[in-house]
Image (cartoon, grey):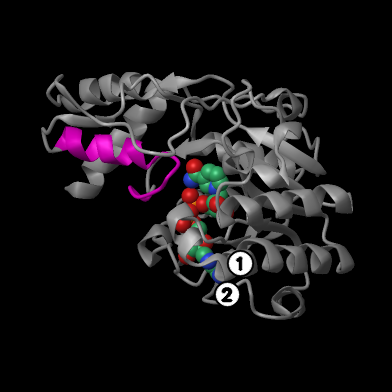
Amino acid sequence: MTKTCLVTGCAGFIGSHLTQALLDTGHSVVGVDNFASGYEHNMEGFIGHTGFTFYKRSIVEEGLLEELKQIHPDLDVVFQLAAVVSVPYSVEHPDLTMKVNFEANRVMLDSAKELGFSSFVFAGSAAEYGNENRLPVKEEYAQDAEQLSPYGVAKYRSSAYIEESGYGCSLRFFNIFGPRQDPTSQYSGVISRFVDFGLAGKNMVIFGDGEQTRDFLYVSDVVTAYLIAAGLDEHGRGPLTGIYNVGTGVGRSVRDLATVVAGLTSAPEVIDFKPERAGDIRHSRADVSRISGKGFRAQVSFEDGLARTVDWAIKSKS
Ligand SMILES: NC(=O)c1ccc[n+]([C@@H]2O[C@H](COP(=O)([O-])OP(=O)(O)OC[C@H]3O[C@@H](n4cnc5c(N)ncnc54)[C@H](O)[C@@H]3O)[C@@H](O)[C@H]2O)c1
């Protein structure tokens, strides 16, 4: 059954992939973005699609969902991706971060519930775990008191609010990568930077010894998780409620990453090591048993995902 879905943050990295996938599978999309960190060119693939309607609006605007529902009575699913995405920016702008990443989300969730939407899916984050060192990280490890930034606080409180409400779900993403990712992203910006170094024939630069690990997930697998969460996958196990980690469950080292990217770009094999950055966590890896129980499994290997990302970077530079 096809649905009409709201995607907030549709001009962003993940939102543009989700929008494209929804349209490709016959759903209609109402997209909202204020271009705070997204770009019009990210929407090139679908801006003229007959099933897509775009609104340059902010999710903090009062009554936004009610207004969109009046214009699009079939609107039935909310994918809430719009957010202040930079941790350092959130430290400089804590009030704005709470307004966008928590308050707007709380209001949107309550409205969606009131209006009878079939599902509400929020973009949570591995940042909600702070400096957690028990691995793999389980959903119940996140605590309000452990947060390291306003970004973490707002994402954590949104997830907790969703869980308490018993309506909608929060997908806690680990390190997502793929085409269109912003190189300044704290999550997997390192991948975009390595690809840029590699294509420019420059040495990779690693902060620390390179043995720090992250749970890197390719963006098309994130789309799969979203479809499951909203009950739009072929098995229709959703809509989900509660909190779910979304990752591969496998940690890959930054040194490993540099080696694979160097092989794909013919960059020099020499790596420049620089002093470790203060505050960087050593290891991060998701316990994915909860989302696996709903049928999710990462399909794209680290190597294939990196090859696709490098291909895209080559094409977008030519
Ligand atoms: N990329 C990752 O690895 C990762 C990991 C964990 C969580 N997340 C979360 O996933 C979501 C998408 O992240 P992304 O990596 O695609 O980032 P992104 O910056 O590419 O996308 C965010 C989009 O939201 C838009 N936006 C910001 N504030 C808005 C507002 N007030 N109203 C309307 N639009 C607004 C931005 O312009 C941008 O297009 C975010 O909520 C982020 O916190 C991402």
For label 1, the residue is 100
Q: In this view, does 13 lie to the left or right of 124?
A: left
Query: Horizontal and vertical percent for residue 233?
Result: 71, 38
Residue at screen point 21% across, 24% down: 262
In-front residue for pair 15/274? 274
Q: Give the range drawn in magenta.
A: 182-199
Q: Is mark 1 within 8 Å of ligand 1?
A: yes
Of helix, strand and loop, which one carries label 2? loop
**Is residue 173 positioned above or below 253 on the image?**
below
For label 2, the residue is 58
Residue at screen point 57% across, 64% down: 97
Picture quadrant of residue 297: top right
What is the C-alpha distance between the residues marked 2 and 1?
9 Å
Q: Which of marks 2 and 1 is in front?
A: 1
Q: Is residue 119 left or right of residue 276?
A: right
Residue type (three-letter) at the residue carrying disc 1? Val
Query: Horizontal and vertical percent for residue 195?
Result: 25, 36
Residue type (three-letter) at the residue carrying disc 2? Ser
Query: Horizontal and vertical percent for residue 291?
Result: 72, 30
